Image (cartoon, coloured by chain):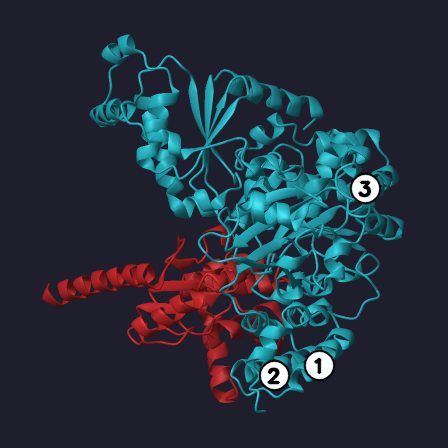
Chain colours: A cyan, B red
Amino acid sequence: MSREKLDQIAEKEQARQSQFDKRIHCCISTACLSAGAGHTIQTLRDSVEAAPTGDEVEVVQTGCMGLCSRGPLVRVQEKSGEEVYYADVDSECAEELVAKTVSWDQAQAKQQKLSSELQTVRARLETARRKRSLKKHILSPDMPFFTKQVKVVLRDVGYVDPEKLEDYLAHGGYEALHKVLTEMSPEQVCDEMLNSGLRGRGGAGFPTGLKWNFVRREQSDVKYVVVNGDEGDPGAYMDRTVMEDNPHQVLEGMMIAAYAVGANHGYFYIRAEYPIAIDRIRGAIRAARRHGILGKSVLGTDFSYNADVRIGAGAFVCGEETALIHSIEGKRGVPRMRPPYPSTSGLWGKPTVINNVETFASVPAIIKEGADWYAQIGTEKSKGTKVFALAGQLTNTGLIEVPMGITLKEIVYEIGGDVPGDAEFKAAQTGGPSGGCIPNTHMDTPVDYESLQELGSIMGSGGLVIIDSTTSMPEFARFFMDFCVDESCGKCVPCRVGTVQIRTLLDKIIEGRGEPEDLDKLEALCQLVRSTSLCGLGQSAPNPVLSTLRFFRHEYEALIPTNA
Amino acid sequence: MSDTGSSNGKLKKAQEHPSGDERYVTLDRTMKRFHNEKDALLEVLHSAQETFGYLSEELLFYISNHLHVPLSQVYGVATFYHQFTFEPQGKHNCIVCTGTACHVKGSSEIVEEMSAVLNIPVGKTTDDGLFSLSTARCLGCCGLAPVAVINGEIQGKATPETIAEKVGRILADEMVVQDQEEAG
């Protein structure tokens, strides 16, 4: 389909949306759904139907609005663009919300003919109008949770209906793809990425533009693009949210990469634990095919591209790029030595770009707004924004997007709203089983790739778990080591045997059988596993132990009997 | 799987299936969609488990035969990934998330309680085939930690009590059904 036809669809959808005086967005992503958003959205729809009003009101299902701990979340958007957020919206609150946000027309109330079911709803709305409990559900727009965030990747997440291509188009979707196909050479696209300073959001932070350039320069008739949606870090769900709530954004980013490197086929590799993400991405691919966005001549140009979904099967190591490639090829997901890197020899031996979901999702905005615009967000070496899944012992947990360089203090105390109850903030864990714990004494650390690494942690894919004073650090380290023992693929000895030995030592210490020299042994063993393992899993597995040994050594020492 | 005699018998039996067990039609369709390519092994295993509930020895033979992949490789791949199970699963299931966020909020207590209530270790199914108990690495609902999933429905901000109560109610309903069946 040509660009003009897509523009027509977008304009038609924009016109349709602008006829509504009010649009009520209801989050239906996993967290809100499990808090009862299914009932909430049904009540909203019924109430809007039963309310006697001259207003045109539309109830829209959207993705994540961020503050998952206060779900179900609802946002009322006025025609003027003004917005009000409501938290903990159960059915009762939904009725009051509708009764009070729509203009109540008494004359119409008498005339309107309603079915008996809607009459009951109307009666409830009449009662709801007199209630005064709505105020406590309103979230102040001045809340640091909202004001401290800068949204690039999540800009449209929570606004667009993820199951509707028209809505994505109405929000400027596929404009960036059209721009690169018609106005830019592949080289220019790679340069733009390089200038933006975007680095891989999967954790390692390799410059995206550089990676794309490697693949672009390879001479090969077949090249591939792979989206790494195997978000295995426990405590992280940024990629799930983006795939579920704005699947077309990831697809568009992937297609721009494909054009830049000269690939005509690509794969989404999504973990099996994310069934909704799998459905939505598949749905997006189907819709894109129907509208000529995917296929033989993309947007009427001579660029052709197709994408497929491959489902992971529950192996953490498959997040490692060479293991992921083996998994797509239908093999055991074990990593191999690099080089050759996938940019030279990837999927089926062909040059392959592998990037994380969030990396691809950042691409359309960079193309549309320009590399300079993106590069002014963040710090000298870490540009742009990062999405974090904020979890653990905090008042506000959920999904946030912050500029690189923001301090941990701002994230924990301002966005997160501090640790609830009497307990105190003790440490922030980043990077999952590959990362480390940053103690409360380093609260002013800016969140960027280098600073976190200096502290023995990593940026990781974006899990940020807050631990309070009730958690024992040696036990927490053992929790991660258990994970690594289970997830070690067994190919190389340091990781297969070393992780088990580390855990045995941790068991010994935690059970009170430790000897004074055990801590040094533990440290030496960790260094050995770190420096000799084959892939990132083994190389980073000791991080949680090393970082807790560094900052919380006294907790380990306290466990060792003094008479030993 | 070491007994070659019975393997051959099963191999033969598996080849006869397409006409008998309709579920094989679904599996055949998946294999056909991927043109019986070896690379599709993982997709085919997914499809097989989705259709049959678990991967029986028979199924692994069948897949090996159709994709022309050595049985050792099919078995190797299937056992590598956590997602695949080789035992029939219970009619109902309870999955407790043990990801980091859930861990720091006490998910291990939920696992212990459920294991005690159902009287089975994690990863097993009750003798009557009613309930399976398992744990997950991370379900990605960290904002609601701790989380458990009962029959596909996510239970956020869970406690050992709320989960035990839910499971207890399902078991009680099953008892009623059983009683009715026995009576009528």
Identify the residue at image location x=42%, y=44%: A33
The residue under label 3 is which amino acid type?
Met
CB under 8 Å between discs 1 and 2: yes
The image quarter in which residue A5 lies: top right
Farthest residue toward the bottom? A564
Q: Is residue A495 left or right of residue A415?
A: right
Q: Given the image, on which type of amino acid does mark 1 rest? A: Leu
The residue that mark 3 highlights is A193
- On screen, A188 above or below B19? above
Is residue B38 in view from this perspective? Answer: no
The chain holding disc 3 is A
First in residue order: circle 2 vs circle 3: 3
Query: Can you say which quadrant of the picture contains the C terminus of chain B?
Result: bottom left
Residue furthest to the front in view is A562
Residue A368: x and y in percent read: 74, 31
Q: Position of residue A72 (x, y in %)?
A: 42, 40
Does B119 appear above or below A203? below
Q: Are marks 2 and 3 in contact (CB under 8 Å)?
A: no
Q: Chain of mark 1?
A: A
Q: Earlier in the sequence, mark 1 or mark 2?
A: 2
Label 1 sits on a secondary structure element that is helix
Whole-number angstrom distance, CA of label 2 to CA of label 3: 46 Å
Q: Nearer the viewer, mark 2 or mark 3?
A: 2
**Residue under numbered circle 1:** A525
Q: Which residue is mark 2?
A: A505
User: Could you tell me residue A360's position as x and y percent?
Assistant: 70, 45
> Which comes sooner in the sequence, label 3 or label 1?
3
Residue B152 appears in which quarter of the rendering?
bottom left
Q: Residues within 10 Å of mark 2 (few under 14, many from 20)?
A: many
